[in-house]
Amino acid sequence: MIGLPRTPSSKINRANPSSTPGGSRVTEENILVTVRMRPLNSREHAKYDLIAWDCPDDHTIVFKNPNPERAAAKYSFDKVYEPTCATQEVYEGGSRDVALSALAGTNATIFAYGQTSSGKTFTMRGVTDGVVKDIYEHIRKTQERSFVLKVSALEIYNETVVDLLNRDTGPLRLLDDPEKGIIVENLVEEVVESRQHLQHLIGICEGQRQVGETALNDKSSRSHQIIRLTIQSSLREIAGRVQSFMATLNLVDLAGSERVSQTNADGLRLKEGNHINQSLLTLTTVIRKLSSGKQGDHIPYRNSKLTRILQNSLGGNSRTAIICTISPALSHVAQTKKTLSFATSAKEVTNCAKVNMVVSEKLLLKHLQQKVAKLESELRSPESSSSTCLKSLLVEREKKIQQMETEMKELKRQRDIAQSELEQERKGKEQKVVRCLSYTAQEESTPSKSVPRSRRTSRVKRKDNVRQSLTSADRTALAQEIRLFEKNQKKLGEEANQALDLIHKEVTSHKLGDQQSAEKFAKMLSEIRDMQKSNLIPEETVVGDEANLKEEINRLNSEEIAALEKKLETVQKFIDMLASSCQTDEETPEFRTQMKKKRVLPFGLSNSPNLQHMIRAPCSPLSSSGTENKAPESNVVSARDSRTPSKDGTPVSSSRQANSVDVKRMKRMFKNAAEENIRNIKDYVTGLKERVAKLQYQKQLLLCQVIELEGNETAESDESQMERPLCFEEQRKQIIMLWHLCHISIIHRTQFYMLFKGDPADQIYMEVELRRLTWLEQHLAELGNASPALLGDEPASYVASSIRALKQEREYLAKRVNTKLGAEEREMLYLKWDVAPVGKQRRQQLINKLWTDPHNTEHVKESAEIVAKLVGFCDSGENIRKEMFELNFASPADKKTWMMGWNFISNFLHL
Ligand code: ADP
Ligand code: MG
C-alpha cells in the first residue's frame, strides 16, 4: 500500500542541499510543457502524408497551412522537439530536471499526453530509462546518503485500477488517508535492490501492458499507466540529522487523447461504457480549470481515479512536466491542434512543490537519546561549553539568594530592634506600676553568695546611691499614683451615687403593683435614702512634694471601696426587683386601668432625662479607653429605636402615638422600652462594678508598693539588711511557700519553676509573682479574719473552689501518668515516692504527693520534673512563654491552661 506523501508542514525543511540534482527548492512553478513531434511513420509515408508543422525555434511550433491566405497557427512551449530529436534530448531538455527532484525530496511527475501512436509510450520508455540511469548515477555519486527506492505500477482502464506488478489482485480501491493523502489499497510496492532490479520490475510492467494490449485489442490506447518510484534518502552519518528526504516520481503514460476529443467534441452518446475515458476527461477539465487561475474554483479531482491519484501533480505539491507528443502528419492536424491546445492550458497551471522531510521516529528517538547523553555528560563536566551557560545561571541565582538573605537579615534586625524597644517600653510600664518592687532588680538579682566580699561592698554602696536617688523620685511618683487612684475612686463613687439617684427616681415613679410590691418598694426607698445620706465622698487631699506614705496607707486602707461595692450590689438588687416587678405589673388589671386612664408612661419613658444622664455618665479616667463608653451609647440608640416601632417597622411619630389608644401596642412598646432600660442600667452598674474591682486590685498593688518603699527606707539605716531585695533563691523559696499556701495550680508552679531559673532578666517576673502571691495571701487572710456577716461566705468559697480546682488538676495529671511515662519509669517513681507496690489509684497517689512539701528543695524540683513530663513541656522552657506571666489586668483567654492559679485571682477580683 502506498500513498502520495502529503508531508505535514511541521516536518518540511525548506533547506535543500545544492549538491542534490533536481535543482533548487521550488515553491511555485508552472507545469513544464514540452512538445515532441515524431517523424512520419511508415503508414503516413505510405499515404504520402505531408508534414504539417514547422519548428522555427526550440520553443515554437507553427502549423504550415497549405492555404497561404489563412493565418498560420503558432504555439509556444517550454521546449519543442523536432522529429529528428532523440528521446534522450527530450528527456534532458526539461523532464530530467523535474524527475530528478525526487532525489531531493520533491515530488515529481512526468506525463506523456497525445493521441494514439503519437509516440507517448515510445517517449516515456526513453524518459524512464534516463531516469533510472540518472537515479543510479546520483546514488553512486552521493555516497554520504543512503537511498531507499521502491517501485509500484498501476494501470487505470475504464476507471479500474490494476496493479501492474501483481495483476492477480484485481481491481484496487483508492482510500483517503488523512496523513498520506490518496492511497491505492493493496498496491504492491517493491523495494528496489539495484538498477537492474528496477529495470527488471519496469520490464514486468511493460510486459503486463503488452499482455493487455494483445488480449484486449485497443486497450493500451485507452488505459493510463503510472510507474511510481518512491525515493527516500538520508545521510549515512546521522550527526544530529534525523530527517530524510522522501518523494515520489510518477511516470505517466496516458491513454490516447483522441478519445476524449471525440467524446467531447461530438457530444455523442457512446454505445459502450468503456469508450468513456472518465480519467482523461477529468484530467483535461482539471487542467483547464487550474489554468484559468480562478480563485476558489472547484477542481474536480475526485471525478476520476487518475486525477485523484495524481492530484498533487496537478496544481499541488509536485513538480510536473508534460510531454505532449504529436504526429507531424497533415492528416492528424486536428488531433495535433487539440493536443497543443491542451498543452497550452497545461502551461498555465502552477504547482507548489515542497521538499518533503520525514522524521523517522526511530532516528528521532536515537537522536534524543544522544542529546540526553550529551547533556548529562555536560552537566557532569562543569567546564563544557553549554554548561557554562548553566553555570552562569546558577551563579546569578546564587547572587539573588544571597541578596534576599541579606535583605532578610536586615529585616530580622529591624524586627529585633522593634521587639526590644517594645519590650523595654513594656518593662518600663511595669516598672512604673511596681516601681518600688523593681528599681534594684537588675542590680541585685545575682545570688550574693557567689559575689566576693569586696565586690559586694562596693556594689552595696552603689546600690545605696541608686536607692537614695530613686527613693525620693519614687515616693513622689507613688504619691501621685495614689492621688490618681483616689481620683478614680472618687469618680466611681460619684457615678455610683448617680446610679443610686436614678434608682431612687425610678422607684418613686414606679407606684404600680399590689400591696406586697408597694411595701417592697417602700422598703427599697428607705434603704436608698439611708444610703444616699451616707454618701460622703472624701475631699481630694492636697499633698506636698514630701508625701507621707504612712498617711497614704491609712487613707488607702479605708473601707471606701468596700462601701462602693456594697452600694453597687444594692443598686443591682433594686434593678432586679424593678425588672421583675415591671414584668408582673403589666399583667395586673390595675396596670391596664392606669394605663388607660392616666396614660402613665413606664419609667423608661417618664425618666428619659435620667436615662440619658445615666447612660452618658462619665467614665473614670481609668476606664476611658472608649469601649466602655461606646456600648451604652449604642444601647441608647437601640432603646430609642425600640420605643417607636410600627407594624411595618417604620418609625411612628409621637403625636400619632399619643392619640392612638392601641393598648396592646402600647403595652408591647412599654414593655420593650422598660426591658431595654433595665438592661441598660444593669449593664452600666455591672461596668461600674468591674471598675471598682479593678480599683480594689490597684489599691492592693499600691499598698504593696508603699509597704515596700517604707521597708526599704527603714533598711537603709541597717547594714545587715544590705542584700535586700531578696536574692533569686530566697525569692523562689518564698514563692514556692506562697504557692502552697494559696493553693496555686501545680501546673502553674511547675511552669514558673521550670522557666525562671535565676536569669537576671527574669527578675521582674520573680518580683511580680512574689508580690501577687504576697498580696493574695494577705488578702485571703484579711478576708478570713473579717466578720462573716459582712463578707458572707466569700473567702471560704474561694479557697474551697481553689482547692477543688487543684484536686481536679491532680486528677487530670494522674490520668496522664500511663501515657506519658514508661512502665519502668512509673515503677521507679512509685518506689521513690513511697507509693504502695500494690493497690488501687497508684497514679493518683503519686500525683497527690507532688508539690506538697514547699520546704524541701529536692521535692519541689522532682515534682516540677514529673508534672512537666506529664503536661508536655520540657526543661528548657520550650512551649512556655515568659509573657504569660506579664502584668496584665485583663484575663487573657489564651492563658487558660497555664494560668489556673492566676485565673483564680482574676475570678476573685471579678476581672
Ligand atoms: P502511442 O503510445 O502514443 O500510442 P507509440 O509510442 O506506441 O505511440 O508509437 C507508435 C509507433 O511510433 C511505435 O512503433 C514507435 O516505435 C514509433 N515512434 C513513436 N515515436 C517515435 C519517434 N520519435 N521516433 C521513431 N519512432 C517513433
Ligand atoms: Mg502508448
Image (cartoon, helix red, strand yellow):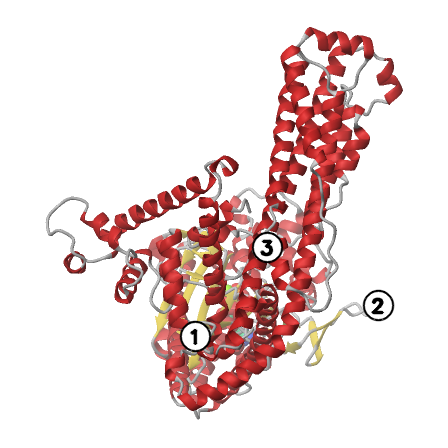
Q: Which residue is drawn at 82% across and 31% down?
A: 609
- Is residue 84 something that shows in the picture? no
First reached walking from the N terminus: tag 1 or tag 3: 3
The residue pinned by badge 2 equals 69
Where does the image place residue 818, in percent across and percent down from the top left? 22, 52
Which mark lies nearer to you, 3 or 2?
A: 3
- Numbered disc 1: secondary structure: loop
**400 on left or right of 198:** right
Where does the image place residue 195, in percent across and percent down from the top left? 38, 79
- Numbered disc 3: secondary structure: helix
**Farthest residue toward the left?**
838
First reached walking from the N terminus: tag 3 or tag 2: 2
Q: Which of 110 and 407 is in front in this view?
A: 407
Q: Is residue 26 above or below residue 274?
A: below
- Compute the Cα span from label 1 to label 2: 134 Å
Q: Nearer the viewer, residue 43 or 596?
A: 596
- Is residue 433 something that shows in the picture? yes
- Numbered disc 2: secondary structure: loop
First reached walking from the N terminus: tag 1 or tag 2: 2
Q: How crowded is mark 2: few (under 14 residues within 10 Å), some or many (20 or more)?
A: few
Q: Is residue 428 above or below residue 257?
A: below
The residue pinned by badge 3 equals 698
- Compute the Cα span from label 1 to label 3: 28 Å
| Residue type, mark 2 in image | Glu
| Residue type, mark 3 in image | Gln
Which mark lies nearer to you, 1 or 2?
A: 1
The residue pinned by badge 1 equals 759
Q: Nearer the viewer, residue 46 or 168?
A: 168
Q: How crowded is mark 1: few (under 14 residues within 10 Å), some or many (20 or more)?
A: few
| Residue type, mark 1 in image | Asp
- Compute the Cα span from label 3 to label 2: 140 Å
